Image (cartoon, rainbow, N blue to C red):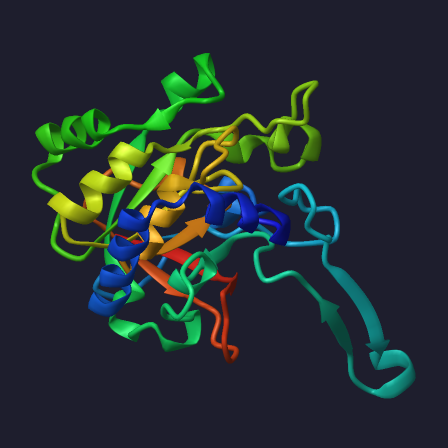
Amino acid sequence: MCAPCVMGLVEKSLSRRELLGIAAGVAAVAVSSAQAQSQVAGKAFSNVADLTHVVSPSFPMFPGASPMKITEVVTVKKDGYYGNTLEIWEHTGTHMDAPAHFVDGAATADTLPVNRLIAPLAVINIKAKADRNPDAEVTADDILAWERSYGRLPNGAFVAMYSGWDSRVNDAKAFVNLDGSNVQHYPGFSPAAAEFLVRERNIVGVGVDTLSLDFGASKDFKSHVTLLGAGKYGLENLANLASVRPNGAMIIVGGPKHKGASGGPSRVMAIW
């Protein structure tokens, strides 16, 4: 998520207590479903799901962010080989939010320990709520309901929200879902759920199938502040979570590794 213009709102929303809490956290540290899932023979797992959208200049963007540009530079016919140059905002398509995206001096994506990029995957399904209300949020009660069905979240888990919003990705207007006052409406994690996950559970990060970890109408981006301030990372615009079992899968995050990355486009897969 997050065009640069939102950051002033975040700074204004933070109390001294919250800033101190963030500092402590820092110190502690479109493919189709048929294409997305396939069999893998001879491995310790038998299924893989691609949780990554194809990114292009038409991909829905957080308001205020520039779409990517792809410029063909050389072709096989003319030059003997094919290649493009890319101009892209880090937070485009299926991408990572590193802690540094919201917290000055926090970890950038290129410095995240690689062992945090492979994790047990928990998929919290709120599609029924999101179908009724685009401002639906993952709550602490949703997480506890998942645990009643599947057991306590594993240590080092990655928690993903499935709202069904990825079905809108080919319609930018429906995906961003602005109202008459230019307020966005789509699901995300509630601040209380974010607080629960960082204080009561041991997770590496969270992900959503929408533009933002916070629900679209958020003005203070409190879930971002809480999660990234605790040293967790986020993944936004995930795809095909409906094809993944709620528990028992692992997530593999091919995160960005350019110097000083606040985040960046990522190739994300689930295996089970």
Q: Is residue 11 above or below residue 214?
A: below
Residue drawn 39% across the image and 70% down it: 105
Answer left or right for 165 relative to 17.
right
Does the rendering let one see residue 42? Answer: no
Residue drawn 42% across the image and 65% down it: 104
Residue drawn 36% across the image and 41% down it: 223
Answer left or right for 137 relative to 17.
right
Closer to us: 242 or 91: 91
Quarter of the image where one finds residue 92? bottom right
Closer to us: 68 or 219: 219
User: Residue 240: image x %, image y %?
Assistant: 45, 41
Q: Is residue 244 above or below residue 22?
A: above
Which residue appears farthest toward the bottom when viewing the image? 80
User: Residue 121: image x %, image y %?
Assistant: 25, 49
Q: Is residue 228 above or below residue 259?
A: above
Closer to us: 192 or 47: 192
User: Residue 96: image x %, image y %?
Assistant: 46, 58
Answer left or right for 123 relative to 171.
left
Which residue appears farthest toward the top when viewing the image? 132
User: Residue 9: image x %, image y %?
Assistant: 53, 43
Closer to us: 38 or 178: 178
Quarter of the image where one finds residue 15? top left
Which residue appears farthest toward the front when viewing the image? 16
Answer left or right for 269 relative to 116.
right
Does the rendering let one see residue 130? Answer: yes
